[in-house]
Image: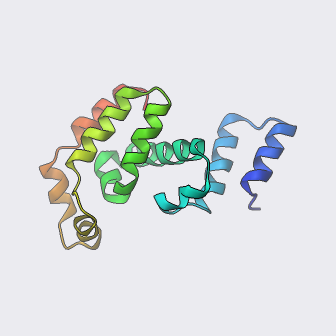
Amino acid sequence: MKRTLQEILTDDEESPIADEDLDDAVWLALCEKITAPSDLQRFQFPVTVYYASRLLQWEVGNGGFAQAAFNVPEWFELAAVGYRFLGKTVAENIILEVKRLLPENEDAVEQLRTGEIEWKGYFVDHDFSVYDEQAYGVSF
């Protein structure tokens, strides 16, 4: 059964939900509402911090920065803001450094996504594994 974010938070206030379960429930509720950075305009800043940083963290944890760069390049800037807000400036700096390696325009990102540019070749030329190791070395 899908619950709204408000229902989840109300349930947690009435009877605290285990942290991991609360995180999963909040995440799933937000995924129903957010598919692009522009969707965050209707939420308060803490939601931006949570969503963008968690999304990038999951992508990096699942497949490294190369995967994150391929799947969610538009979220890097907001994730960096989130990590800065959380006081994790080392992680913020790693994200911003990787962001500088990404294609600078939406056309290039779209070409990567559609296969017009060979993404594996692009990301091999930019060794993201160095940044993966740095991220794993901090509390990312």
Count of marks placed on residues: 0
- Quadrant of the image occupied by residue 117: bottom left
Q: Residue at x 82, y 45 (%)?
A: 10
Considering only vertical position in the picture, is 42 above or below 96? below
Give 57 or 52, whichever is nearer the viewer.
52
Q: Residue at x 59, y 46 (%)?
A: 47
| Quadrant of the drawing holding the N terminus | bottom right
Position of residue 122 measured from the top left corner of the image (x, y, whole percent):
16, 57
Tell whether 102 sits left or right of 18: left
Considering only vertical position in the picture, is 3 above or below 96? below
Position of residue 41 measured from the top left corner of the image (x, y, whole percent):
55, 56
How is the model colour-coded? rainbow
Q: Residue at x 47, y 42 (%)?
A: 53
Position of residue 115 measured from the top left corner of the image (x, y, whole percent):
23, 72
| Quadrant of the drawing holding the C terminus | top left
Residue found farthest to the right: 14
Give 41 or 25, whichever is nearer the viewer.
41
Give 131 or 86, whichever is nearer the viewer.
86
Position of residue 86 measured from the top left corner of the image (x, y, whole percent):
50, 30
- Quadrant of the image occupied by residue 34: bottom right
Tell whether 16 sits left or right of 95: right
